[in-house]
Amino acid sequence: MSVVTVVVVAIATAGCSGEPRGPHASEQRSPSDAFVIPDKERATVEVAANNGDVAAVKRLIDHYEALSGSDEDAAKWKAVARERGDSQQLNYYAASTLTAARRENDPAKRRAMVLDALAAARRSNAGNANPSAQKLILEGTRAMEAEQ
């Protein structure tokens, strides 16, 4: 093996001892822990979210999605984001509703779901014209045409 290869391997593996480091080295942490809002800060973030701060709403969505068993809380804040016109949440809702509509057997329910998805995609596109919303509008329109 050449000296260059040995040096490169040594540098590449220098920090790979597998030993936890830092102030919380003894704690087992998950990548989702980065999204958890500390208890002492959460009330402040909720006040900001309730006062119209969409960035705070998004932080709460990330927080509750990172916690196991908090799906209802995450869904509540996603609805708030949609009400405030957040294009990302409107697109997500439109896409997931269109997907669910494809699996729905009841034609009346399926039609209502597609109309709901179309409304969300149109709101998203009206607030911030974007290719994702436009694609969802096209898909929803095609789904409505297929129903007729």
Image (cartoon, rainbow, N blue to C red):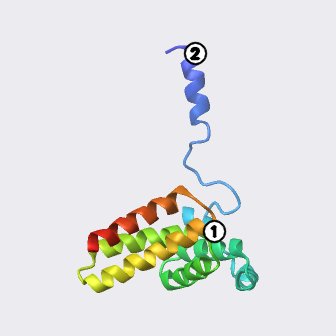
Earlier residue among tags 1 and 2: 2
Q: Which amino acid does label 2 sit on?
A: Val
Q: Residue at x 62, y 30 (%)?
A: 11
Picture coordinates of residue 52 (x, y %)? Answer: 73, 81
Q: What residue type is labelled 1?
A: Gly
What's the CA distance linking mark 1 and mark 2? 59 Å
Task: Determine crowd level at label 1: few under 14, some 14-19, many 20+ residues with C-alpha closer than 10 A.
Answer: few
Picture coordinates of residue 95 (x, y %)? Answer: 43, 68
Picture coordinates of residue 93 (x, y %)? Answer: 48, 73
Q: Residue at x 51, y 63 (%)?
A: 133
Q: Splitting the image into 4 quarters, where does residue 127 fall?
A: bottom right
Work out whether residue 96 or residue 129 is closer to the camera in this orientation and state it: 129
Picture coordinates of residue 51 (x, y %)? Answer: 75, 84
Determine which residue is flagged by label 2. 3
98 horizontally vs 76: left or right: left
| Circle 1 or circle 2, nearest the eye | 1
Q: Which residue is drawn at 53% across and 70% down?
A: 122
6 horizontally vs 56: left or right: left
Determine which residue is flagged by label 1. 127
20 horizontally vs 103: left or right: right
Q: What element carries label 1?
A: helix
Residue 28 visible in the current orientation = no
Q: Splitting the image into 4 quarters, where does residue 80 fall?
A: bottom right
Task: Determine crowd level at label 2: few under 14, some 14-19, many 20+ residues with C-alpha closer than 10 A.
Answer: few
